[in-house]
Image (tube, helix red, strand yellow):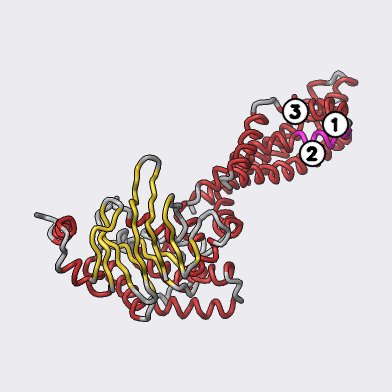
C-alpha cells in the first residue's frame, strides 16, 4: 500500500536519509524505532508530503507522493498524520477540530459529519468533551482528539510521529490504548515511537533506523527480543536500561 | 467676538472638510487593507516571483515620503495620460502608501500562527487557500486587529496630506479660512480639536482590543 523506494534527503549539506526502502501492506502496523536524529520523523513527513526528498520515490497505492504537485492534497486525504505536539486548531472545539476535514475538505454535510465526529470522539473516550477547546484539555486528551481528527478523514493509513513523546508519563497509556484499538480494527499504521512495549505488542514489523538508514528490520520478536546488529543491541540496551 | 462666536462662524465650512476627511480616510483604509492583504499573502505563498514582487513593492513604498507619492500620482500621472481627480489621487496615494505598513502587520499576524497547525491542516488534505481561510485568518485577525486600529488613526491624521493636492478636506478648509480671516489661533485650534475628536474613539477602541486579545 505504501512503497518507500530508495529515498534520499538532505538539509543543505547534511544528509539525513541515505537510501531507505520499505513497503507497508494494507492493515499492517509498522513501528520505526531508533535514536533521535536518525531520520525517523523525516521519513514519515516525506510520506505525507510535508517534506520533499531528492532521490527515490514514495508511492501510495501506486500514486507518487510529490509535494509540488496538486495531487498531494488527494494523497493527504488518504493518509492522515498524528503529530508529536498534537497540532490541534486552538480556536476550535474538540468537535470542530474533528469535523473540520470532513466538512471543508470532503464537503460533507454538517449533520452527518457531526454524527460521525461525535461517534469518533466517543470511541477515543472523549464523548464528554465535545465542546471543549484544546487549551482546556490535557495532553493525552488533545492527542486523542488529534487521532479522532485523523480518523475522521477515513484514511487508508495513519502516520504517527512520536505520538506520546510530548506527554506526561501517566498520560501515555490512554493514547497507546486508543492506538492499539485502531490497529486491532485493521488500520494500516506507520508509527515512529520510543514505546518499545507498544511496538512489541502491536507492531507487525519493526524497523530500526540509524544515521538515515535502516539497520535492521523484522518482526518485533526478531528486532526487539533478539536483535542481530550490534547497533540495534546497543540502542535497545540503552532504552531499556537507561541508568547503566 | 469671543472664541465661540468665531468658532460657530467657521464650523460649517470646517464640517464640509470633515466630511471629505472621512471619505478619504474610509476609502484609503479599504484600499490599503485590500492591497496590504494581497502583499502579505503573496509573501506567504513562498512562490519566488510573488515574494520578490511583494517585498520589492513594500520596500519601495516605505522608502518614499507619502507626500511625494501623492505629488507623483496627482502631478506626474497626467503626463502619461492618467488623469485623476484630486480626491481619487489622494485616496489611491494614501491607500498604496499605507498598504506597505498594512502588509507588514498582516505578514506578522500570519507568521505568528504555529507551523504545526498548518502542517496538521495540510495533513487532512487542506489546500493552501483553505488553510488560510480556516486556520490562519481566524487566528491572525486577533493579532492583527489592535495594530490595525492604530493604522486607521494614522491614516485619519495623514489624510491631511491630501490638502497639498487641493482636496478640500479639514486641513485645507482650515488653511483657506485662516488665509482669509488671519484668525490662525481659532481656526487651527478648531482643526486640531476636530482631529482629536475623530481619533479618540478609535484610540479607545484600539486599547480595548489590545486588552481583550492580550488575554486570549
The chain under label 2 reads B
| Helix, strand or loop status at disc 1 | loop
- Of pointers 2 and 3, the one earlier in the residue sequence: 2
Q: Nearer the viewer, mark 2 or mark 3?
A: 3
Q: Does label 1 lie on the same chain as label 2? A: yes
Residue B167's disc number: 1
Q: Is residue A96 left or right of residue B72?
A: left
Residue B126 occupies quadrant? bottom right
Give how far apart the Cα atoms at labels 2 and 3 are.
Answer: 16 Å
Residue at the spot x=56%, y=62% of the render? A71
Residue B80: percent from left, percent from top: 86, 29
- Image location (x, y in percent) of residue A94: 47, 69
Foreground: disc 1 or disc 3: 3
Query: At which x and y percent is residue B198?
Result: 73, 39
Residue drawn 52% across and 46% down? B111
**Where does label 2 land, which residue?**
B24
A4 vs A172, left or right, is: right
The residue carrying pointer 2 sits among few (fewer than 14), some (14 to 19) or many (20 or more) residues within 10 Å by Cα, namely many
Disc 3 designates what residue?
Answer: B69
Q: What is the span of residues highlighted in magenta in the rendered image?
A: B83-93
Q: Nearer the viewer, residue A227 or A124?
A: A227
On the rendered image, what quadrant is the C terminus of chain A found in?
bottom left
Residue A210 appears in the rendering: yes
Q: In this view, does A78 lie to the left or right of A159?
A: right
Of residues A117 and A181, the one drawn nearer to the viewer in this rendering: A181
Amino acid at each position: 500500500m505504501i512503497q518507500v523506494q530508495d529515498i534520499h534527503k538532505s538539509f543543505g549539506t547534511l544528509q539525513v536519509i541515505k537510501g531507505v526502502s520499505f513497503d507497508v501492506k494494507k492493515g499492517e502496523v509498522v513501528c520505526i524505532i531508533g535514536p533521535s536524529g536518525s531520520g525517523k520523523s523525516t521519513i514519515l513527513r516525506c510520506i505525507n508530503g510535508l517534506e520533499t526528498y531528492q532521490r527515490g520515490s514514495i508511492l501510495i497505492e501506486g500514486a507518487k507522493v510529490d509535494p509540488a504537485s496538486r495531487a498531494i492534497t488527494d494523497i493527504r486525504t488518504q493518509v492522515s498524520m498524528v503529530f508529536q505536539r498534537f497540532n490541534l486548531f486552538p480556536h476550535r472545539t474538540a468537535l470542530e477540530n474533528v469535523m473540520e476535514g470532513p466538512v471543508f475538505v470532503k464537503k460533507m454535510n454538517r449533520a452527518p459529519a457531526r454524527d460521525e465526529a461525535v461517534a469518533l470522539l466517543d470511541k477515543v473516550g472523549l464523548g464528554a468533551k465535545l465542546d471543549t477547546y484544546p487549551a482546556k484539555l490535557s495532553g493525552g486528551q488533545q492527542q486523542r482528539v488529534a487521532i479522532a481528527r485523523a480518523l475522521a478523514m477515513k484514511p487508508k493509513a495513519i502516520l504517527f510521529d512520536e505520538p506520546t513523546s510530548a506527554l506526561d508519563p501517566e498520560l501515555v497509556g490512554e493514547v497507546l490504548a486508543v492506538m492499539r484499538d485502531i490497529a486491532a480494527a485493521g488500520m494500516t499504521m506507520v508509527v515512529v515511537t520510543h514505546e518499545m512495549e507498544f511496538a512489541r505488542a502491536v507492531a507487525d514489523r519493526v524497523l530500526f533506523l540509524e544515521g538515515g538508514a535502516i539497520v535492521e528490520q523484522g518482526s518485533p520478536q526478531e528486532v526487539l527480543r533478539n536483535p542481530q546488529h550490534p547497533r540495534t543491541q546497543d540502542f535497545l540496551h540503552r532504552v531499556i536500561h537507561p541508568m547503566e | 467676538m469671543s472664541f465661540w462666536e468665531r468658532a460657530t462662524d467657521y464650523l460649517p465650512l470646517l464640517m464640509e472638510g470633515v466630511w471629505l476627511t472621512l471619505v478619504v480616510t474610509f476609502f484609503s483604509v479599504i484600499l490599503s487593507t485590500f492591497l496590504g492583504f494581497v502583499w502579505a499573502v503573496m509573501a506567504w505563498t513562498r512562490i519566488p516571483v510573488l515574494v520578490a514582487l511583494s517585498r520589492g513593492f513594500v520596500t519601495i513604498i516605505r522608502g518614499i515620503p507619502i507626500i511625494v507619492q501623492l505629488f507623483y500620482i496627482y502631478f506626474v500621472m497626467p503626463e502619461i495620460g492618467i488623469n485623476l481627480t484630486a480626491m481619487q489621487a489622494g485616496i489611491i496615494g494614501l491607500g498604496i502608501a499605507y498598504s506597505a505598513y498594512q502588509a507588514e502587520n498582516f505578514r506578522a499576524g500570519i507568521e505568528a500562527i504555529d507551523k504545526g497547525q498548518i502542517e496538521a491542516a495540510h495533513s487532512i488534505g487542506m489546500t493552501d487557500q483553505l488553510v488560510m481561510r480556516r486556520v490562519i485568518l481566524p487566528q491572525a485577525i486577533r493579532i492583527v486587529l489592535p495594530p490595525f486600529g492604530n493604522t486607521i488613526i494614522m491614516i485619519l491624521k495623514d489624510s491631511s496630506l491630501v490638502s497639498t493636492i487641493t482636496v478640500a478636506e479639514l486641513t485645507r478648509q482650515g488653511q483657506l479660512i485662516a488665509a482669509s480671516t488671519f484668525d490662525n489661533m481659532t481656526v487651527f485650534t478648531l482643526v486640531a480639536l476636530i482631529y482629536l475628536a475623530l481619533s479618540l474613539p478609535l484610540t479607545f477602541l484600539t486599547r480595548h482590543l489590545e486588552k481583550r486579545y492580550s488575554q486570549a
